[in-house]
Amino acid sequence: MALWEYIALLVGVLISGGIALAIKTESKVTVQILLSFSGAYILGITVLHLMPSVFSGDFETASFWLLGGFFIQLLLEQLSKGVEHGHIHAHPGAKPGFAISIMLGLCLHAFIEGLPLSNYTDFHNALHSHGHDSEDHHLLFGIILHKIPAAFALMILFIKSGYSKNMAWLCLVIFASMSPLGALVTSNMHLDLAILANLVALVVGSFLHISTTILFEADDKRQHAVSWRKLVVILAGLGLSMFTLH
């Protein structure tokens, strides 16, 4: 994985969290619009790019890993309180255990997502190159896009819960480093295609949970109706994922 990819993973989170710390409040409309776009894009790349790669070979256990990723994410959200998809439920005067729970859920999730990153291009090329190598960054961009609203929500949550800026920045840096750390752990490992397929399937399960949760929650005031603005943003996210199809 190139240096710029590690930097992009870090910078997206740090900038988003830094903006949240600067304004100290959230615009629910802005957050929902950003979430709707990222959720639609993640769903698009998952269905159009990641799942075909996982199931294009004879990987017998990939389906189980996909289901595992879905339910692991379900369990992790019991710790993170849904920050991954923009939930901000402040706890004024919260004890340290609250921050530990949030960070444990978010960091485990981010670390798992990073595991297949270093080898994903090689994995993709081995299955789809047809004699030539190409750079494939769908997984990278998907992780970055859904980390941006998560970082924003995390910082707003900590500020509203009474944590200091230093504590919030420390948590932000730790969170930002988790996906690059996951990628670094596997960067020098020679993983065969079956193992890579299982790792990607694990992330696919997580992406399916996050993206569908975001889109299910996109309805205005829980009246099972989506505003035209959100619908346009969702279509834009899906369109971008289709535009990069090759």
Image (spheres, helix red, strand yellow):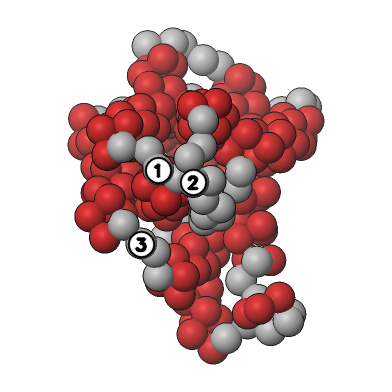
Is residue 214 in view? yes
User: Residue beneath label 3, please?
Assistant: 25
Mark positioned earlier in the residue sequence (1 or 3): 3
Local packing at callout 1 (Cα closer than 10 Å; few below 14, some 14-19, many 20+) is some
Disc 1 secondary structure class:
loop
User: At 26% across and 33% down in the image, what residue appears?
Assistant: 166
Is there a contact, CB below 8 Å, between mark 1 and mark 2? yes
**Callout count:** 3
Between 160 and 84, which is closer to the camera in this rendering? 160
Left or right? Give the position of 117 relative to 228.
left
Mark positioned earlier in the residue sequence (3 or 2): 3
Is there a contact, CB below 8 Å, between mark 1 and mark 3? no
User: Residue beneath label 1, please?
Assistant: 162
Q: Disc 1 to disc 3, how far (Cα)?
A: 13 Å
* Residue 176 vertical placement versus 20 (above, below): above
Disc 2 secondary structure class:
loop
Is there a contact, CB below 8 Å, between mark 3 and mark 2? no
Q: Amino acid at mark 3?
A: Thr
